[in-house]
Each structure stands twice: as C-alpha cells, then as structure tokens.
Amino acid sequence: MNAFSAVPLMPKIVRHSVRSISLVAVLLVFMHLARGGFRGLHTLGWTDACLVMFLLVGLGASAWRRLRRTALGSVIELRDDLELGGGLVAAAFIVVAIGGAALFPLIYLLMAFLVAFLQRNAGITLLGVALVFDGLVTLGGPGPGSGAAFATHALFLSLFAAMYHVVLSARIAAARRAESGAVQKRIKEVEERARTFRLISSGTQDSFSGMNQDEKWLVASVKEVEGAVGAALEVAETALRTHTCASFLLDSDDRGLKLHDCRSASDRVQRERFHSGEGIIGGVLKRRAPVRMNSLNGLKGITYYESAPAVQAVLAVPIIETGGQVRGVLVADRITNDPFSDQDERLLTILAGEVLRAIEVERVMTYIRKSRDEKDRFFRAIEELNRAGNPEQVFIAVLESARQVASLDFCAVTLVSEVDGKRMHRVARMTGVTAGGKALEGQAFPDNNGLVANVVRYGAPLPGRDIKAMDRQIVFDEETQIKGLGALKIFPLTAGDRILGTLVVGSRKKVLDADVLRMLEVMAIQAAQAVLRAQLFEQMERMATTDGLTGLLNHRTFQSKADEHLAQARRYQRKLSLILTDIDHFKSVNDTYGHPTGDAVLKGVAKILRDKARDTDIVARYGGEEFAIIMPETDAKGALVIAERIREAVKAEVFQTEMGPLKVTLSLGISTGPDHGYDKQHLIDLSDQCLYHAKRNGRNQSVTVAQMQGGRKLQVAEAG
C-alpha cells in the first residue's frame, strides 16, 4: 500500500478506535468486578481509579456521538444504544460494588429505564448483559447464599424491565387513542357546524374523516364563518353596550337552537341545545321579524340563560336567507333600564345580514369546489376509458369511474350478443352488492321483459322514474333479484346505431342526483365507444394472427411462436417436438366434391387437431391442406402418441356431402429437439421429409426421424 492510499484510511481508523473505547471500558470493568475489584471505598486503588476514568471517557464519547446523530437527524443505530446502555450498566454495578448490596435497586431502576426507552432489541440485550454482570459478581463472591441472591436479582431485573416496558407501551397506546379520539371529535364538530351553516347537506351520510383535502377545506370554511360571526358580535357589543350579545343557530333539523358564539359579562349563557319554539327567541323565529322588549321589573321568557339575570332590555333579530328560511337569531340584552332604539335594531339587522352573507359565500365556495371535484373525477374517468386497450380494461375503468363519480353501491356492465339467432345478455363485470348472495359476474340470461333487456330493446335509459318496491323489480331476469337498493338506473351502451349492452348503476339512497345521472349517461356513451374500439382491435388482432377458414393460428404466427418456444427450450435444454401433417389426396377431394366440401374438410380436420392436441400445444395452419403442431416439453415418443391419436380421430371422422359420405386420412412427420438440434428451419425440414416419407410409403401414418432414417422403430403407447 503506498502513501497516497494510506492517507484516507487514517480518519476511518481513528473513528473505529474512538468507537471502541466504550466497549473496551465495559469489558475491562466486567473483568475487574469478576476478579473482586471495587469491593468498598477502603480497597480502591490506582487500577480502580483508572478503570472508572476510562469508563467515564467511554460514556462521554457514546453520549456525544448519540447527541450528534440526533442533531443531524440520523437514525440511532442498535450499536449506539448498546454502547451507551452498556456503559451505564457497568457504572451502576461499580456503584453497587462500592456501596454494598443495599444499593442494588438502583440497577433495577436503571434496567427499567433502559428497556422502556431504548430499542426493544437493545433493551433485551442489555438485560442479558446485566444478568451476566450480576452472575460474575454474585456467584463469584464468598458465602453460601450467592446462588439464591443471583436468582433473586435475576427475577427482579426481569420483572422491573417487563413491567416498565408494558406500562410505557400501554401509556403510549392510550395517548395515541386519546389523540385519535380528539381529532375525530374535532372533525365531527366541524361537520356538525358545516351542516348548521348548510355548507354540506344536513341529510348527508358522507364522512370527511378519511379525506384530508375535504377536511382542510371544511375546517377552513367553518373558520371563515366563525370569524365573521365573531367580528359581528364584537361590533355589536361595542356599539350597543350590551350585557350579552350572542348568536344562536338552528341545528340541522331546525328543531333546536344552540349557542354559536357570544360576548357576555355572564357565565350563565345557555351552552346546551334548547328548544327553538320557546320564549322571546321562539317568537322571533315564528314572526321572522326583529323583537324589542324592555321592563323595569325584568323580562320573562329569557330562555338563553341557564338561570336568567334581571334582564331589562332585549333586542333579537332573525338571521333570514334570501328564500325566507330562518337560520338563527342574533340577541343583545342589557341589565340596565336602557331600551334599544330603532338605530340599534338597524345595526343588529345589518350585522345579521353580514353573518348570513359569510355563510352563503362559504356555501357557494363549497358548491364550486364540489362541482370542480366532480368534474375532475368525470374527466379522469373519460381519460381512463379512452386509454383502455381491451374490453376487460374498459369494464374495470367504467365501473371504477362510475363508483367514484356517483358513490354507487352497485354497478354492472352487460353485453348483448346473438346466439343461434336469439339475443343473449351476459354480465361482463360487476361490483358492489350481490344478487341474494350470488355473484352476478359471468352470468348469462336470454332476452326477457326485464329492465336490462328492455334498455337494449328500446335504446333508452330505464326506469324513467323512481321505482317503488325495488326488491321485486326484474332487472336481469326473474331468478336474479338485487337487494338493498333505493335507486336504480340503466343506460344503453350505444355506439353509432349499435347497442352493445348496458351500464347498470344503483345506490342505497332513494334518489340519484340529476347532474350525476347526466355524467353517467355520458360515461355510458364513452364506454360504448371504448368497448367497440377494443372489440374491433381484438378482431383485427385475431384476423392478423389466425387463419380465417379454420380459426387456427396462421403461418406467420406459427413462425413467431416456433422462435419463441425454441429459444426457451434451448435456454433450459428441454425437449420440444414439431409435427407437420397433410391431408392425403386432398386435391382429389376438391376435384371430386368441389371446393366448398374441401373447405368443410379443412375445418373438420382443424377442429380435430385443436381438440386432440394439449392445451400447451400450438396448432397452426401451415398452408393449403398442411397443418403444424408445436409441442413443448415433449420427446419423440410422446409426440408420436399424440400424432397417432390425431390420425385415428381423422380416419374415423365421416364428412357428409351431397355425393354421399366422405372419409379422409392424414400423414404426419415428427422431429424433436434437442435430438435434431434447436434450429427452426432444420426441424421444419426434417418434419417435412418425414411427412413425405409417410406419403411415399402408403400414407395414413405417423413417421419420426428415427423411423425415416431406418433406426429402431419407436414403441407407441396406447393413446389416453
């Protein structure tokens, strides 16, 4: 190592040396205690003093590193806890050794502290260190009772550590629950005030506890209203020289009043809910007009105090919306004989209007925000639909988007198709409630008089109005009943002049909002277009990869599949066989029976190939009357079994023609990798040579490379 490479290592070596001070000090103290060191003040010497100083230096270094890591925001590692804790344990044992066994409870307290406040792994490790420390000191000491003393120490150390850990954990859990409860309580209070201000619907069941942005907006709205009310009361108190000036708002059911805010010299203002139809305030609400009253002997009907003082003058002004709906009352009173004037009434009426204006502004802002969020969700839903590449992705996108836009409890997409000239409906995808406990997804049902069938039949959304006795309504078919819905709407999936199916939405609420229904209708139109695009794409992809007559993979797809499976077989050194097959005397079939019969024979042979091949095999039309089969994980013997099974099935098949029954046979050639390599063209050429070897030697037979080359004939197992 040269000088240049040694220089950077020096700080690292120094750091490791410094970090080792605490560990070395603890070990030396352990060893000195085990040898009888620190046995009282009168026995202390230079060795004891040096060890104590060394331990203090180690503790100081450990504490300094811990404080530095905390200041830098670094994670406290297990080693840091062990270094500091180990030094404290060693120091505690030195104190006990010098002061006597009466001080041993200090170690109990220290272990309780370490286990409670350090990492769990560190606390358990330090408990073990303390037990080892105590064992060295106690068991190595004089006297017959050392074993019992060690057992007692070990028991109490474990009990103190466990007790403190459990107590601290319980207190932390309780504090977290209390914090969570306080947060939830505050959210509920904000929601209730928002309903009081009509910032949200009084009948809504929506909860804002799980939506941070909604919580922030709601809290901000409530604070704005509260600020406006507080400012109005400040003005009223100063200008009208009142004893009490308070705002009482009707709660969400309009049956009770509750204090919202007040400025009062009395602490007896009613803070609990009280009936809105009683006393002077009840008269204000009924008349919807300001009320002024005064009396030298004290007024009656003052219901907004817990125990009413001698109020001699009262002015109460209703808070009335533009449409005439009363929302609350502003009240001002005096306990002196100083009646309120017309000017005072006008001022309080203006302040009541300012309070109402603040509430209406926040209500409008909440409506704007809600509309913006709904539109954002709607446009995101349209984007998701436009990005969907296949029908399955479309179904998932439309269901998820519909649920987000409308908060639906049930949503399903159905598709319609023609089967044997009859219309059939199928539930392609659904989410939400089930039909009497039965999952609807994948269920098919024929055309009937249900709502889904009628929507497809007439191309219009149904039902046209709210349905009573929803549970008895036929939605899909008579055997399927949707339980627990209060509202239902079914939209046709219309693309041009075609109806592809329906979008079925339902909610436990009694009514679906008109704006939401309009968005869902547009989404249904977009979904139909997306489904049609996806179906056309799948159809084009199918046309590009399959043979139009037989439905098997075409020649181009066979070539790419062969490359893929051969590459995999080559990589893992696995078997793979290739079969080429040809219909015997097929030209004479076309010449004798005509090309339509030849096409029927091709389709019939293709069906047999597809049915007799395994699910893992790749079956393709190679060209003309030739077919190919790629057989992964298959040796020559296994491929010959499948080939013979196919040959026998074709031989037994009878094709009915105008000229009478027709039977055909197959010749098949088989090659296998790695027996003959993994080169695709080489395997194709070998299979082709085996095929023509079969034709030259009588047709209607399967030939492997080994048989063609005159080798040992393979024994063919019984098929099946």
Image (cartoon, rainbow, N blue to C red):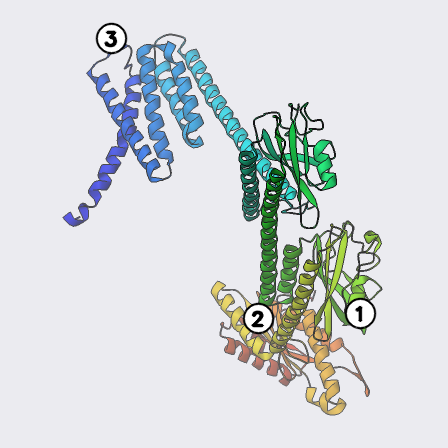
Figure label count: 3
In primary-sequence order, the first of circles 1 and 3 is: 3
Q: How far is mark 1 from mark 3, CA to CA?
A: 108 Å
Q: Which of 226 and 479 lies nearest the eye of the viewer?
A: 226
Determine whether, in the image, residue 607 is placed left or right of residue 16: right
Q: Is 75 located above or below residue 549 in the figure?
A: above
Tag shown at residue 711: none
| Residue drawn at the location 25% of the way across and 37% of the way down | 15
Q: Which quadrant of the figure contains the C terminus?
A: bottom right
Residue type at numbered disc 2: Ser
Q: Identify the residue under disc 2.
A: 577
Which quarter of the figure has residue 348?
Answer: top right
Which quarter of the figure has residue 527?
Answer: bottom right
Mark in front: 1 vs 3: 1
Q: Which of 410 and 327 lies nearest the eye of the viewer?
A: 327
Disc 3 crowd rating (10 Å Cα; few below 14, some 14-19, many 20+) is: few
Please provide percent x and percent y for residue 508.
74, 50
Q: Identify the residue under disc 3.
A: 42
Please provide percent x and percent y for residue 164.
47, 23
Q: Secondary structure at mark 3?
A: helix
Disc 2 crowd rating (10 Å Cα; few below 14, some 14-19, many 20+) is: many
